[in-house]
Image: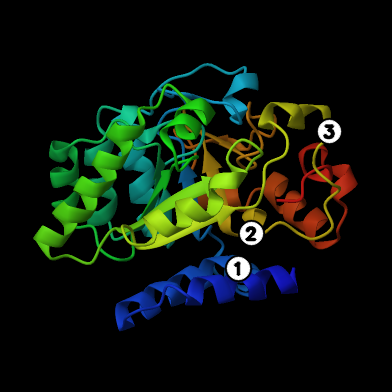
């Protein structure tokens, strides 16, 4: 854990080019330091961030995606429920909202309104997208939604070339995605605002490994950050058999920092819990602090601190 934390810090320091970058980096360190996360969790009695699944529908079908084995119903989060959650988050001291989970957030017809409402309540935003559904109108409305350099938009682009990109992310249109990202960068510059921070992400796998350096060389001159995530050697759909991921050795920071919420309001353990096997309640009729400090969630953290991972089915074979 120590080495991974030092490696993360070194990698992020490469992107500090101004004082605002430094301030943004300090904010990010707040969320990733295991010691700070545990201390803050105990002191504040609330999660540092929410992972909100605005929808679990998607417009493409990536070869590595976990949605292939998802069994639960698909849908869109009701806007009134979303506002209730964001209001509760602001009152509870939540700092950041991740507006994505198992789906493409820009499929939600009110996603721009969700971004605007979240910012008006004083929360930072992280959003991941495949970039297909953006257009200049959506970009303009996002840039008018009080976004700043505390916000982070990640574009999943799993290939440098058209062939690899479209083969790995089945249904994507390579030229459309590149055009949309370039439009976002240009329009942000024209608005003379510092955010959101724009990042392209490549999850490495055998299909795109040879394009890793070309990907980095191209995008580093376009967006603020370029990230290449360690190689995926198996499809996520194979995680269910319990044989792909190694046994967990250290406590997961997610149980200390993050509350994961499905589109229907159900609170579950984390991103690995595709079908909500660990259901801690629903935010339609319960509050964030109430669920976060429930006996069930406290038990999870206590077992993680004691490294009793084998007693937790989802955690025992996970080392994220």
Against 164, is 198 above or below? below
- N-term-proximal mark, 2 vs 1: 1
At 88% across and 44% down in the image, what residue appears? 311
Which x, y percent locates residue 90?
36, 57
- Disc 2, disc 1: CB below 8 Å? yes
Image quadrant in which you'd find residue 199: bottom left
32 on left or right of 313: left
User: How far is the residue under mark 3 from the one under mark 1?
Assistant: 28 Å
Task: Measuring from the top left, give residue 164's x and y in whole percent.
Answer: 50, 33
**In the displayed structure image, the side of residue 320 where residue 94 appears, left or right:** left
From where the camera sits, is residue 263 visible?
Answer: no
Residue indicated by mark 3? 242
Q: Which residue is mark 2?
A: 256
Instruction: Name the residue rendered at 76%, 50% in the picture.
Output: 319
Residue at image position (71%, 44%) is: 296
Instruction: State the SS at label 2.
Output: helix
User: Considering the numbered disc 1 on the image, is that residue within a helix, a strand or a loop?
Assistant: helix
Which residue appears farthest toward the left when viewing the image? 190
**Mark 2 to mark 3 CA distance (whole Å):** 24 Å
- Find numbered disc 3 in the image and state the secondary structure of the residue it sits on: loop
Residue on which disc 1 sits? 37
User: Do the residues bearing badges 2 and 3 touch, measured as CB atoms within 8 Å?
Assistant: no
Graded by Cα atoms within 10 Å as few (under 14), some (14 to 19) or many (20 or more), the crowding at tag 2 reads: many
Choose mark 3 or mark 1, whichever is in front: 3
Q: Residue at x 47, y 49 (%)?
A: 201
Q: Is residue 305 above or below residue 177?
A: below
Cα distance between the residues tagged 2 and 1: 6 Å
């Amino acid at each position: 854990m120590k080495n991974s934390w030092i490696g993360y810090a070194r990698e992020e320091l490469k992107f500090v080019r101004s004082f605002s970058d430094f301030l943004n980096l300090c904010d990010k360190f707040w969320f990733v330091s295991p010691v700070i996360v545990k201390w803050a969790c105990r002191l504040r009695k609330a999660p540092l961030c929410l992972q909100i699944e605005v929808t679990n529908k998607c417009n493409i079908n990536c070869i590595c995606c976990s949605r292939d084995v998802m069994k639960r119903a698909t849908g869109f989060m009701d806007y009134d429920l979303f506002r209730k959650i964001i209001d509760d988050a602001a009152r509870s001291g939540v700092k950041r909202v991740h507006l994505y989970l198992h789906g493409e957030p820009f499929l939600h017809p009110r996603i721009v309104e969700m971004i605007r409402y979240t910012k008006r309540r004083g929360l930072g935003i992280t959003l991941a997208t495949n970039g297909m559904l953006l257009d200049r109108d959506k970009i303009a409305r996002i840039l008018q939604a009080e976004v700043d350099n505390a916000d982070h938009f990640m574009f999943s682009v799993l290939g440098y070339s058209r062939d690899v990109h479209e083969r790995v992310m089945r249904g994507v249109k390579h030229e459309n995605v590149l055009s949309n990202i370039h439009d976002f960068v240009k329009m942000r510059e024209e608005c003379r605002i510092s955010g959101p921070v724009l990042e392209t992400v490549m999850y490495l796998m055998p299909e795109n490994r040879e394009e890793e350096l070309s990907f980095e060389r191209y995008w580093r001159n376009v967006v603020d950050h370029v990230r290449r995530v360690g190689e995926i050697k198996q499809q996520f759909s194979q995680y269910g058999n319990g044989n792909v991921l190694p046994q967990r050795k250290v406590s997961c920071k997610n149980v200390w920092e993050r509350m994961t919420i499905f589109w229907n309001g159900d609170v579950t353990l984390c991103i690995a819990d595709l079908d909500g096997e660990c259901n801690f309640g629903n935010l339609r009729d319960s509050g964030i602090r109430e669920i976060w400090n429930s006996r069930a969630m406290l038990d999870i953290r206590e077992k993680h601190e004691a490294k009793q991972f084998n007693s937790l089915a989802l955690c025992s074979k996970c080392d994220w």
